[in-house]
Image: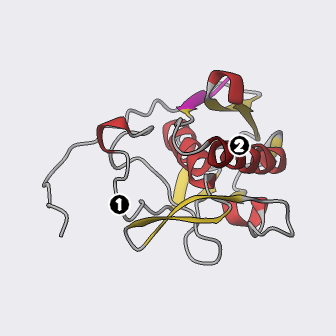
Amino acid sequence: LWCESATAIPDRGSPETRANRISNLLLAASKIHHLQLNSGQIFGFCHRVGHPTLRNGFKEGPVFVRGQVQSGVGGGLCLIATNLFHLFLTSGCQILERHCHSIDAYGGDRFYQLGQDASIAYGYKDLIVRNSSAVALQLRLQVLPEADQVVSSLWGKAENPWQVQVNSIVLQEVPSP
């Protein structure tokens, strides 16, 4: 085991919204679970999960667009992207592309540390990482609705050569307009 990341699934919105979010998370996880990342190989979230459309099996859920909470197909996928960003960051993998959300909609109830989220917008914002180790890694990703968690882990056939510590520090607070 190289590293592991657990992210709480927020219990927000109507029962339908929650069910749709869980459905989107399960579908995305099924496309990522057991992914093999060879040395030097690049992982792109959007490339792997695909375009979140109704035709591709995704459902309406909460999304953030230009600082507003809206409903959109594939809503909730950022939760997995945020979980994976933390996993890859603490594993020592190279982060090639990552975007923060346009707002902090959760405030003190956020499911990630401030500044450690990852926003996804197909064709516009992605999470892209490179396995910069000499070891092939296996990515495991599970959505556990009964525990309200997304859990990911990276596994290799050799020990992780790095120890990574991540600290978030608020440098400035800018009030919302």
Amino acid carrying label 2: it is Ala
Residue 10 highlighted magenta (yes or no) = no
Classify residue 4 by image quadrant.
top right
Q: Does the magenta stretch include residue 2?
A: yes
Q: Residue drawn 63% across and 49% down? A: 17
Circle 1 sits on which residue?
Answer: 103
Q: Closer to the camera: disc 2 or disc 1?
A: 2
Colour theme: secondary structure
In the picture of the structure, the residue carrying the numbered disc 2 is 19
Q: Of callouts 2 and 1, which one flags the residue occurring earlier in the amino acid sequence?
A: 2
Classify mark 1: helix, strand or loop.
Answer: loop
Rendering coords of residue 66 (x, y %): 40, 74
User: Dot 2: few (<14), some (14–19), or many (≥20) neighbours within 10 Å?
Assistant: some
Count of marks, rendered view: 2
Q: Which of 71 and 162 is in front in this view?
A: 71
- Residue 167 location, x and y as percent? 30, 37
